[in-house]
Image: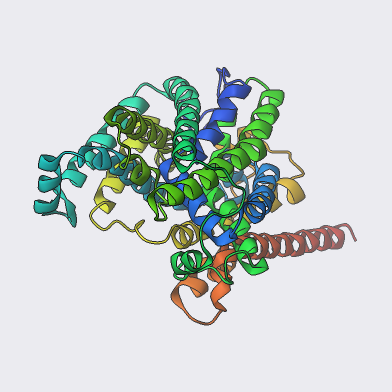
Amino acid sequence: MSIPNASPSLYNEDLAPATERKWGAFSIFNVWTSDVHSLWGYYLAASLFLLCGNFLNFIIAIGLGSLVIFFLTGVPYPVLARSSFGIWGANVPALVRAVVACFWYGAHTAAASGAIVALLTRSEGIMAFHKSTHFLGHSGLEVICFVIIWALQLLIIQRGMETVRRFQDWAGPAVWVMMLILAIYLLVKAGSFSFGSGIPRDVLLEKTKDAGIPGEPGSIASLGAVAATWITYFAALYLNFCDFSRYARDEAAVRKGNIWGLPVNLILFTLVAGVTTTAAFTVYGEVLLHPDQISAKFDSWFLALLAALTFAVATLGINVVANFVSPAFDFANVFPKRITFKRGGYIAALIALVLYPFAPWEGGAAAFVGGIGATMGPIFGVMMVDYYLISKGVVNVNALYQEDGQYRYQGGWHVSAFIAAGIGALFSSILPNFTTMLPSWWGVYGWFFGVAIGGGVYYVLRSVSATKARDRAGNRVG
């Protein structure tokens, strides 16, 4: 698509509207499978299962969360960032999203490399090396595996978005097969199948006491927190989704892919995670939240190898889809003349590599997800209100690439959007994470407060601005 009078500071071929649209419903479906079918997705699902106390509560909480996720998708990030924050101001939410993605990039790379470490340490010699050699705050084996997995992802992205599509179309279903094998293997060893929790109450209380979630397992407060955490886990992808839907053949493909990829796939995957966690406890007598911990206990080397490779590949899938593509576009958006899509991806990968020694993603899954996801809430709220309530779903695409067009606002920055997002961030991230001014449960729902407060303030500011503009026009006519 040709953009007339496009500014070189706002336009390059990677940021231009897509000309080839080959992604069908199956590829859109696998955008979502890649996001949840990962070691971190399983770890979070298994952790939340413990908080629910039993399968019925788990399905209710995750099902509710998955339906909310389905109705929140579809806001086009690159378009709306400039239309709501201004042509230059859009760089700020773009960089916020990029930083969040870099954190997740490191987290998933570490999880994938951990699956390989769990396999290799079955060897006594390698286990000895693992225990005796340490640097950068990790074992030598962990560092080597992390760097190898980190490098493999660069090879995938170098060949462009069509290669990304083919890779995720294979990786998404592959982990489903391995998850079913894992669940069936454990159920056979356990000798029973039950929709009860299968895990004693005292064990649930011990494992969830430091989760940062209000209420005991199975309580209303706990179930609400589980649904909120599940929704927040996908917070970045609500904005990332347009980076892939722009390649879809038509709206029907997007709708069909979303229906199967979100409520249906998410509920089934989390159900398998719950079954596997319960069966693993019956077989091994301990709560194992990481699937690589379970596969490491397999008697069969072949089955352990198959599991480790599948989980690693699945985690590579989410990293490429959710945490490489999006920051690549974000960094390219800041300096279109100098940074291409590939260079932007290299920058994101380098940041994740620098973060590895500090490992900010280690710790409780729910707390990490909440802290990272909450930063995106106010941005999402502003953009959603601007697109649906202010612009009524109509965007001047040409003006998005023009320095003196409709979205220049105040010198390229939209002050109202930044005020609203700043106030939203105060209540979604800053106060709950760095002060004790708010109740302890507030942080669990930080993303929601960010969306509501950021979006609400933005709507008020735009309404006041529109009223003043009408009054000035009326005075001139009078």
Instruction: Check the image and report above or below for 186 versus 425.
Output: above
- Residue 335 horizontal side relative to residue 87, left or right: left
Kindly give the residue lying farthest to the right in the view shown.
478
Name the residue located 67 percent from the left edge and 62 percent from the top edge: 452
- Exactly how many numbered labels are in the figure? 0
Instruction: Write down the quadrant of residue 229 in the picture.
Output: bottom right
Q: Nearer the viewer, residue 442 or 389?
A: 442
Instruction: Check the image and report above or below for 63 versus 28.
Output: below
Tell me how the rendering is colored. rainbow
Q: Quadrant of the C terminus?
A: bottom right
Q: Nearer the viewer, residue 53 or 458?
A: 53
**Is residue 417 shown to the viewer in this render?**
no
Kindly give the residue lying farthest to the bottom in the view shown.
437
Q: Looking at the picture, how far across and down is residue 28, in whole percent?
A: 59, 28
Instruction: Write down the quadrant of residue 303 in the picture.
Output: top left
Name the residue located 74 percent from the left edge and 40 percent from the top edge: 393
Kindly give the residue lying farthest to the front in the view shown.
191
Instruction: Check the image and report above or below for 193 versus 229.
Output: above
Q: Looking at the picture, how far across and down is residue 455, in whole percent?
A: 67, 59
**Is residue 390 shown to the viewer in this render?**
yes
Q: Looking at the picture, how far across and down is residue 356, in whole percent?
A: 26, 51
Name the residue located 63 percent from the left edge and 50 percent from the top edge: 62
Q: Looking at the picture, how far across and down is residue 235, in whole percent?
A: 55, 50
- Residue 203 horizontal side relative to residue 389, left or right: left
Q: Nearer the viewer, residue 302 or 308?
A: 302
Q: Quadrant of the N terminus?
A: top right
Name the residue located 47 percent from the left edge and 45 percent from the top edge: 42
